[in-house]
């Protein structure tokens, strides 16, 4: 589908458009530049997308060679363009009625056979008569669109409106009323590899370029505002004392996060400048980055020194983009201090600020949720210190989490290993049991030993964990196991099953997502390869055709020249003979004329 | 890379005579009257058919139309003489230079009256009058199946006449004493009466789009006549019903 504004006719010609139409006054129409008022959108099928109002495409040159080989003054590219533009405009006067050849030939000067050829060409490519009702009589050559099908669709004949598009015909939302339609962005379309399924309204040609198809998938990596979670496009304000960014809106609103004042923010250039930075971070670089951050913390100069190939800015950006980037920074900042509740409060406040989209719940639930989050988050943080290289594999960051708690939990459990997930579940469950009575019953049943006594040790365990801080997963697992046998046998399977089911399910989902991603990437690569090969072959063919053409012309010319030379020679000899000069015979004998 | 136009584009080397259409068919017109009975017909004949076919055709026509047998010889003779005419031109040269000629249609076929004019390129040896006639009938929604072939025949006939004219003019030029330049000069001046002046119509200063007021002149007119009108016309022409 292409948009082409209506142009004024060239001077000296009477316009042939109906009175009510509006005409764009620009001499050189710019399809993108006009606002919608001036644009008169012209719908043509996707396989004719090569068509350009201002130019003559090679397809036209190849199909209507007579106009372009300079063989006659009555067939020039300009004349061809006049014919073409006139026919198309005539059709556009009323797209819902079928334009017949007789309509146009009465208004054009030229050989009717040639005009018919042009007409058939335009009709075959769907540049005219695509939205018109089917014609009478033979479908054959004059019938309708359906010419250039890659699938070799044998269907000839009439154009069909969008639902029920025949196999092999590519039609872009053709409304029955003939009103031109604005094409939605191609990313909306379903890409099914160009196969023959007619599901969905849009089908792209099978060699669509990557950007046509995957535009939606290509995420624009932008800066995420720390306080509102939106992307900062135009510019962002960076906290000078730390690593925190807020977007322009938040700055204006004054919501800059806790413990910060507006004065501490300085304006930073928008995405445009950062786009120029090298965006490629290899694994080695990322690992180096994380290590240097854990060593140097906030000192970006040292960090940038360590990661030699990236500037300070790049490092900061990359860190923010990584999941837990900011939290890691916050964590390492407090690495030296004791792991006490204050530190956690900071962590959790960050968590809370990011996940501020939790749905409304009752106060008690909120509190318990927060506690759980805090606990789980804490344990995850414990692990982080051990395994920075693993972190980059986790594509989803916490800040992307949705509004539901389950999503949060599943995300978190996906980000860490199964051991940790089970342990976290255990402690979370115990925390819940501390709050309310019912879950306690579910998990621990009617066991007598479930009393405040045992729940307290659980709490103590947690408290000790918080206080110890550093990764002591090994300690935790036995603890969890110790708690495990306490419940009766009948409830063990339930717990275990629940935990493993969650973990497995999440892992499976992640694996599928990754596989899909791989799939898409492969498809994209193959498509681009095929496209370039095709283009190469096309170019070669064009070149050779051109060459052949030139050769033919040259041959004809030489032939003519030869004829002229021969006749000239004859006349000279004639004259010589008439003059009675006999010595010509001495010099050479009359050679017989070779066939001409 | 635009092609340099051939210097001799307007004065091709003369080609052998043929009907300038994709199919080499000769238009044959018959108008025979014997004892008050009149037989008029027009059709195309393939000159590569053997001559024996002529007699067979004549016999069958007489039988189908229930004409008196005297017609057979007359029909056969007429066809043969026209074919001979055609063959006499065949060996000779004619000009095939770029020539856009106006073709006019003004005919009545049974109940349909057709009037039209358009341009035709004489040099286009791939032209197909039958295809044009088919499109014409389809676009104008003509129901009578005899109209199409009649239109094609009319076109062919006019092309034939112009081709013959080309041959005669070529013959005359050859014996003229203009020498080498004669080949180039003649098409422009001598045949200018029939064909269009290309420069005038296709040059840079003019547009190939006709003015709106001219459209009616070039629009085909198709009238369906009532039976009375047909009878009146026929009586005027003195035609027997076929």
Image (cartoon, rainbow, N blue to C red):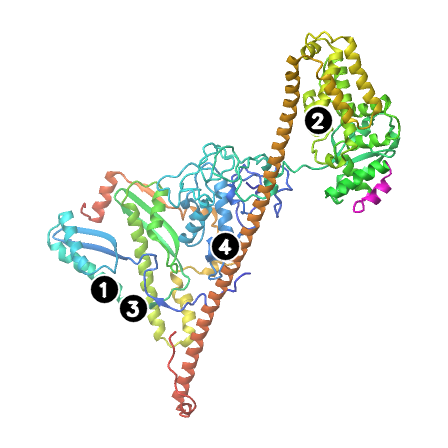
The kind of secondary structure element at disc 2 is: helix
Q: Taking A149 as reference, is B23 left or right?
A: left
Chain at numbered mark 1: B
Tell whether label 4 touches label 1 (CB within 8 Å).
no
Foreground mark, 3 or 2, reads: 2
Residue B91 has which mark?
3
The residue that mark 4 highlights is: A61
**Residue extent of the magenta highlight:** A298-311
The kind of secondary structure element at disc 1 is: helix
Instruction: Residue A197: give x, y in percent of width and height.
Output: 48, 35
Residue B84 has which mark?
1
**How far apart, in angstroms, are the residues tagged by discs 2 and 1?**
105 Å
The kind of secondary structure element at disc 4 is: helix
Q: Is residue A412 visible?
A: no
Instruction: Residue A202: give x, y in percent of width and height.
Output: 53, 36
Residue A500 has which mark?
none
Q: Taking A252 as reference, is A124 left or right?
A: left
- Give residue B231's quadrant in the image: top left
Chain at numbered mark 4: A
- Give residue A102's quadrant in the image: top left
**Magenta stretch containing residue A233, yes or no?**
no
The residue that mark 2 highlights is: A419
Tell whether label 3 touches label 1 (CB within 8 Å).
no
The kind of secondary structure element at disc 3 is: loop
Tell whether label 1 touches label 2 (CB within 8 Å).
no
Instruction: Residue A386: give x, y in percent of width and height.
Output: 78, 33
């Amino acid at each position: 589908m292409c948009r082409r504004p209506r142009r004024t006719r060239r001077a000296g010609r009477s316009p042939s458009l109906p009175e009510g139409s509006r005409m764009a006054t620009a001499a050189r129409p710019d399809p993108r530049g006009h606002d919608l008022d001036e644009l008169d959108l012209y719908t043509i099928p996707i396989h004719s997308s090569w068509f350009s109002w201002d130019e003559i495409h090679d397809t036209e040159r190849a199909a209507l060679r007579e106009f372009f080989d300079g063989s006659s003054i009555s067939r020039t590219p300009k004349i061809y363009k006049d014919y073409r533009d006139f026919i198309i405009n005539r059709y556009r006067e009323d797209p819902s009625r079928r334009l017949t050849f007789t309509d146009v030939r009465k208004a054009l000067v030229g050989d009717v056979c040639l005009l018919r050829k042009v007409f058939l060409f335009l009709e075959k490519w769907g540049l005219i008569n695509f939205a018109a009702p089917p014609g009478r009589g033979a479908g054959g050559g004059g019938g309708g669109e359906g010419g250039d099908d890659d699938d070799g669709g044998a269907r000839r004949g009439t154009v069909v409106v969008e639902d029920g598009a025949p196999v092999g015909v590519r039609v872009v939302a053709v409304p029955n009323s003939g009103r031109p339609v604005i094409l939605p962005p191609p990313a909306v379309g379903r890409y099914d590899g160009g196969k023959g399924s007619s599901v969905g309204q849009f089908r792209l040609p099978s060699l669509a370029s990557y950007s046509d198809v995957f535009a939606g998938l290509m995420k624009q990596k932008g800066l995420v505002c720390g306080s509102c979670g939106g992307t900062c496009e135009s510019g962002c304000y960076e906290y000078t004392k730390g690593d925190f960014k807020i977007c322009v809106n938040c700055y204006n609103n004054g919501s800059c996060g806790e413990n910060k004042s507006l004065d501490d923010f300085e304006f930073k250039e928008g995405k445009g400048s950062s786009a120029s930075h090298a965006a490629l971070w290899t694994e080695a670089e990322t690992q180096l980055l994380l290590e240097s951050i854990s060593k140097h913390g906030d000192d970006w100069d040292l960090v940038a020194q360590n990661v030699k190939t990236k500037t300070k800015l790049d490092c900061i950006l990359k860190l923010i983009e990584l999941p837990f980037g900011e939290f890691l920074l916050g964590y390492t900042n407090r690495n030296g201090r004791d792991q006490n509740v204050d530190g956690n409060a900071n962590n959790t406040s960050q968590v809370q600020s990011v996940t501020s989209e939790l749905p409304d719940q009752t106060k008690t639930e909120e509190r318990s949720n927060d506690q759980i989050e805090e606990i789980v988050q804490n344990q995850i943080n414990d692990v982080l210190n051990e395994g920075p290289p693993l972190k980059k594999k986790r594509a989803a960051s916490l800040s992307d989490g949705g509004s539901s708690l389950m999503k949060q939990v599943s995300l978190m459990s996906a980000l860490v290993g199964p051991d940790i997930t089970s342990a976290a579940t255990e402690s979370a469950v115990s925390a819940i049991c501390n709050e309310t009575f019912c879950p306690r019953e579910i998990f621990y049943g009617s066991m007598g030993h479930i009393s405040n006594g045992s729940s307290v040790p659980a709490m103590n365990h947690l408290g000790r964990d918080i206080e110890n801080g550093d990764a002591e997963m090994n300690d935790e697992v036995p603890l969890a196991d110790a708690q495990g046998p306490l419940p009766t046998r009948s409830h063990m399977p339930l717990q275990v099953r629940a935990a493993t089911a969650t973990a497995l399910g999440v892992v499976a989902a992640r694996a599928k997502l990754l596989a899909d991603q791989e799939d898409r990437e492969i498809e994209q690569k193959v498509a681009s390869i095929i496209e370039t090969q095709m283009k190469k072959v096309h170019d070669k063919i064009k070149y050779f055709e051109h060459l052949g053409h030139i050769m033919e012309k040259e041959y004809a010319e030489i032939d003519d020249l030869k004829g002229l030379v021969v006749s000239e020679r004859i006349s000279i000899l004639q004259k010589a003979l008439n003059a009675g000069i006999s010595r010509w015979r001495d010099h050479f004998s009359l050679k017989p004329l070779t066939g001409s | 890379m635009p092609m340099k136009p051939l210097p001799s584009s307007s004065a091709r080397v003369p080609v052998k005579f043929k009907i300038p259409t994709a199919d080499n068919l000769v238009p044959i017109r018959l108008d025979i009257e014997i004892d008050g009975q009149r037989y008029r017909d027009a059709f195309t004949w393939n000159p590569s058919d053997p001559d024996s076919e002529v007699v067979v055709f004549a016999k069958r026509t007489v039988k189908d139309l229930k004409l008196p047998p005297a017609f057979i010889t007359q029909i056969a003779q007429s066809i043969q003489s026209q074919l001979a005419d055609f063959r006499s031109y065949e060996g000779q040269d004619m000009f095939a230079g770029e020539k856009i000629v106006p073709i006019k249609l003004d005919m009545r076929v049974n109940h349909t009256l057709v009037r039209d004019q358009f341009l035709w390129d004489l040099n286009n040896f791939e032209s197909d009058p039958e295809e044009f006639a088919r499109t014409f009938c389809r676009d104008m929604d003509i129901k009578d199946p005899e109209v199409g072939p009649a239109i094609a025949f009319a076109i062919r006939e006019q092309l034939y006449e112009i081709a013959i004219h080309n041959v005669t003019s070529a013959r005359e030029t050859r014996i003229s004493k203009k020498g080498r330049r004669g080949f180039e000069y003649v098409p422009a001046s001598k045949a200018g009466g029939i064909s269009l002046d290309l420069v005038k119509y296709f040059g840079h200063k003019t547009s190939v789009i006709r003015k709106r007021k001219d459209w009616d002149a070039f629009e085909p007119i198709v009238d369906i006549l009532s039976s009375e009108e047909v009878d009146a016309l026929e009586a005027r022409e003195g035609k027997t019903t076929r």
